Amino acid sequence: MANLGIRILGLNLEHPILNASGILGSEPVHVDILVKYGFSCIVTKTITLEPREGYPPPILIELDNGGYLNAVGLANPGVKGICPMVERARLLGRPIIVSVGGGDSREYVEVSIKAEECGASGVELNLSCPHVRGFGLELGADPSMVYRVVRDVVSVLKIPVLAKLGFSDKVIESSGRALEAGAAGLTLINTIKAMYIDVYSAKPVLSNKYGGLSGPPIKPIAIRVVYDVYREYGALIIGCGGVSGWRDAAEFILAGARAVQVGSGFLRNRGIVGDILAGLRKWLEVQGVESIEELVGFAHRS
Amino acid sequence: MLIPALKISVEKLSSSYYRALFKLLEPPRIEPKPLQFINIWIPGLDEVPMSISDYTAGDYTLSIIFKVVGDGTRGLRDRNGFFGVKGFLGNGIVTSGYDRVLFVAGGSGIAPLPFLSRKCVENGCIVDVVWGVRRGDMLFNIGKYAVGLGEVYYATEDCTIGYCGKASSLVRRIVERSGFKWSLVISVGPNQMLREVCYTFRSLQNSYVSLETMVKCGLGACGSCLLKPLPKLLCLDGPVFKCSEVYHILG
Ligand SMILES: Cc1cc2nc3c(=O)[nH]c(=O)nc-3n(C[C@H](O)[C@H](O)[C@H](O)COP(=O)(O)O)c2cc1C
Ligand code: FES
């Protein structure tokens, strides 16, 4: 029987499919829902020090090319929301990674410390939110800032730190700097800054005008980034962007990802985790491989 | 998908309610079901969840019945031109297989009735209606917008029209007097009313409520529509639930 178990961040995960940050994950009952739908490890919504209301609607639209565009505005309960979610995940027997956001290095450090105190399995630094000023994208596109934030967090934490980066010209360099600063791994990639204009009213639809593009349209970009970063550094990578079936997950794994996060794909298909796992099992059988671990980065063999 | 929609008309129905009619400029991927909802985008202003009040497949017209409660709904009333329809959202209800349906509405809970009765008529069933409001001047003749209704009862808390009291008490009286004749009961309105109607029909299998919560994304991502403490999202798992699933969270 094909083995889909995978080891990342010192955790033995039943299978490599996690939820992407921002799909539910801002309160304990959301954790119940994500567990019910089968994710092997839960990732919270990005948490900032103070609670944030987020933007007014429209915050999310489905595009006719299969993608989604969102500008939720990092709505989250603040650090006081962390412990109840971690507690719930523990009761349900699932590891949980807290996604951390911040306007500066100090905020990332404080939120990360709280996550560790609450008993999270790890933190994922969101260095790449494309639609909230001062939270991310500019930061992730600046390799020396990435280095600083990751180093500041790593230096005070015992639990592993992931750096989540978005697409930019500097993503390979930023990945390298994050690893140099002590990140245990990288989550690649976040949404890509984009816009949708309604041609009848002649207005951008999202209340924030700009949003982050996710879903199938960004997958080939994400695959390329994972491929290049794996080739360059051979690091732990969690692939993310446009996974809507097992074939996409398999592609990320071959490019070098040890695990895969699913966001938009879950919005379209609540049964996606089961569908992906069934597909991956068959794929392993056809490939004649016992364990999925053997296929991580397999597209790089000469 | 955001379906562009042109506003055709708006009319005042009573002291509190308006009805706006839109034409969808692109055919939707699938037909709506009764009690599904849309998020309607008022360009540059807001996006608000609304029950589908009526929909005709032939010419893609869609209507909503609403109360003006803020900038968004004011925009729905006062603006003309183009809007955007995100939908159709939620689970809705299928009416085939029932012969006689009771629809209990509190206040603007009356909104989804026209499409429900239209679908019922297509499936050969009849809808009886109990509609309660606070003041008599909030009522309008729902029979003008909904086809194929059976009996229609009104209840007002100011005792000016119909039964003097709440819709849920009127329902109890009707049942006490003439028993159940419905194979399906659907209630839409304040939680307290839903709870009381569910209680009256506690022995009936097919007794449903349509709930309301804070809907933001409408697509199952943001989690703002969570029906705490249940692990259910209104925008995906609802708005329609069996009484037995949600009775204990109804106020
Ligand atoms: C509605 C929505 C909210 C999101 N919120 C966050 C967030 O808070 N933090 C974060 O790091 N990424 C967030 N993302 C990005 C996702 O985690 C993911 O990186 C991106 O959507 C690409 O994956 P996908 O194509 O599977 O959706 C969000 C995405 C969506 C669609
Ligand atoms: S409104 Fe966002 S999840 Fe239901």
Image (tube, grey):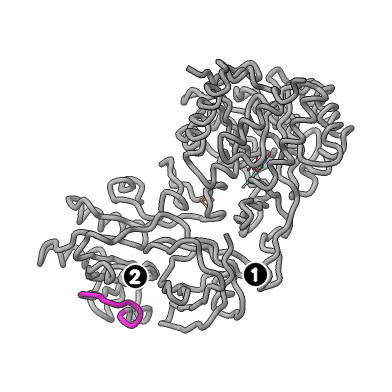
Identify residue for label 2. B113
Q: Amino acid at mark 2?
A: Leu
**Cβ(mark 2) to ligand 2 < 8 Å?**
no
Q: Position of residue A100 (x, y in %)?
A: 69, 34
Residue lying at the far right of the rendered structure: A144
- The answer to whether residue A152 is left or right of residue A251 is right
Tell if the residue under mark 2 belongs to the same chain as the one under mark 1.
yes
Please report, as a chain letter, where disc 2 is located: B
Q: CA distance from mark 2 to mark 1?
A: 27 Å
Q: Amino acid at mark 1?
A: Pro
Identify residue for label 1. B43
Please report, as a chain letter, where disc 1 is located: B
Instruction: Let me know if residue A156 appears in the view.
Output: no
Q: Residues within 10 Å of mark 2 (few under 14, many from 20)?
A: many
Residue lying at the far left of the rendered structure: B178
CB-based contact (under 8 Å), mark 2 and mark 1: no
Q: Residue at x 54, y 62 (%)?
A: B86
Considering only vertical position in the picture, is A161 above or below B95? above
- The answer to whether residue A250 is left or right of residue B55 is right
Q: Quadrant of residue B191?
A: bottom left
Magenta-highlighted residues: B143-151
Using the image as rendered, state which of residue B181 and residue A56 is in the foreground: B181
Q: Position of residue B156 (x, y in %)?
A: 29, 74
Provide the secondary structure element on which disc 2 rests. Answer: helix
Q: Residue at x 36, y 70 (%)?
A: B115
Q: Position of residue A233 (x, y in %)?
A: 81, 22
Q: Is residue A12 magenta?
A: no
Q: Earlier in the sequence, mark 2 or mark 1?
A: 1
Provide the secondary structure element on which disc 1 rests. Answer: loop
